[in-house]
Image (cartoon, rainbow, N blue to C red):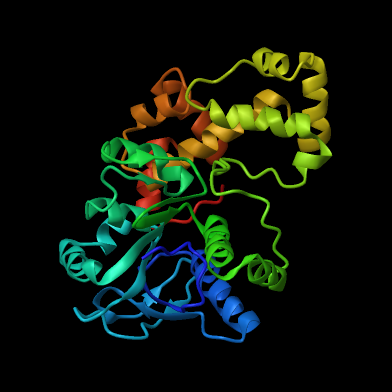
Amino acid sequence: MDLFTRSNAPLKITLLLAADSSLMSLASVLDVMRGANRMAQSKLFDWQIITPHDQAVQLTCGLSIQPDVAFNPQLQGDILIILAGFHHEQHFDKALLRQLKNIIPRFHWIGGIESGSWALARLGLLDGHQATTHWEDLEDFALKHPSIQVKPDRFVIDAPTFTSGGASPSFDFMLHLIRCRYGQQLALEVASIFIYDPIHTRHDAQSLVCLGLLETQEPRVAKAIRLMAEHLEDPLSIRQIAQELALSVRMLEYLFREQLNATPAQYYLHLRLHNARRLVTDTGLSIQEIALRTGFSSLAVLSRCFRDTYQFSPAHYRHRFKQGINHTA
């Protein structure tokens, strides 16, 4: 089935929703389909939600979603989308993966949104294919699945699979699908419903740092921040960053103070520590490995800087996080 060739045929979609998923990622799929049906005055998209074990799943925002139908071996359709977020390893146990393996041949296309890509990878569906996942997981995804051509793109299409990095890229993917299958006019009408400007292409890399208005207000600072984000593991000197921008160090410092009320060095340290905290809470990496990945010369240096910012050492912070203790930082 050529999903992206012009057609008037409706699509039947089953969406497997895991607990701890993002409401925004879910809405980026469902509301775009709803909008397309409304603007076309036709049921171009016919969807249903299933969940692991046929139970309500709680999203990261606390909202609970009930399945529309039972997860059964007779499920079939044009597209199966797997949407997952945090704790995907525990949500996709061996029993669920077996169930998925049984129904996958009954669908023409399989999609993975955010951590849904990990489920596709564990099923072997992405071996030899290009794929993406959320930018926070790209490095680990590539390390654990060397047979996959991991891309930093917002979304990747490699028949019969497609993968998306998260909420906004999924919105872009759905508009791309509508544009290819049902026409540019409908895609623009759907984007207009949500006052959404589709400025990205599918091959644009996922942004490690969202720069917002800074891109237009002070593009030199925006470019400096992108350089910092691209060099967390091997930090550049502030002088090197200034040279890349054809600025003096003094001018770069002035621009940062004006826009961010911080020096370039302070902001760079903030980015590295923010990434370190994410790795502390969201991964099982050793603190030594986290220090290396965030450009600190030693575990001791990371621990000192981490404690100054977050009040606890990385190890203590991880322990408190696992115990469900809220952090004030």
Q: Residue at x 20, y 67 (%)?
A: 96
In the foreground, 257 or 181: 181
Specify whether 62 is left or right of 94: right
Look at the picture and state if 140 lies above or below 80: above
Residue 272 appears at what percent x and percent y? Answer: 54, 31
Work out which quarter of the rendered image holds the N terminus and state it.
Answer: bottom left
Look at the picture and state if 251 lies above or below 172: above
Residue 49 appears at what percent x and percent y? Answer: 38, 78
Look at the picture and state if 200 lies above or below 254: below
Residue 104 appears at what percent x and percent y? Answer: 24, 67
In the foreground, 229 or 161: 161
Look at the picture and state if 323 lies above or below 263: below
Task: Specify whether residue 209 is in view.
Answer: yes
Q: Residue at x 52, y 85 (%)?
A: 43
The quadrant where residue 109 appears: bottom left
Residue 187 appears at what percent x and percent y? Answer: 63, 67
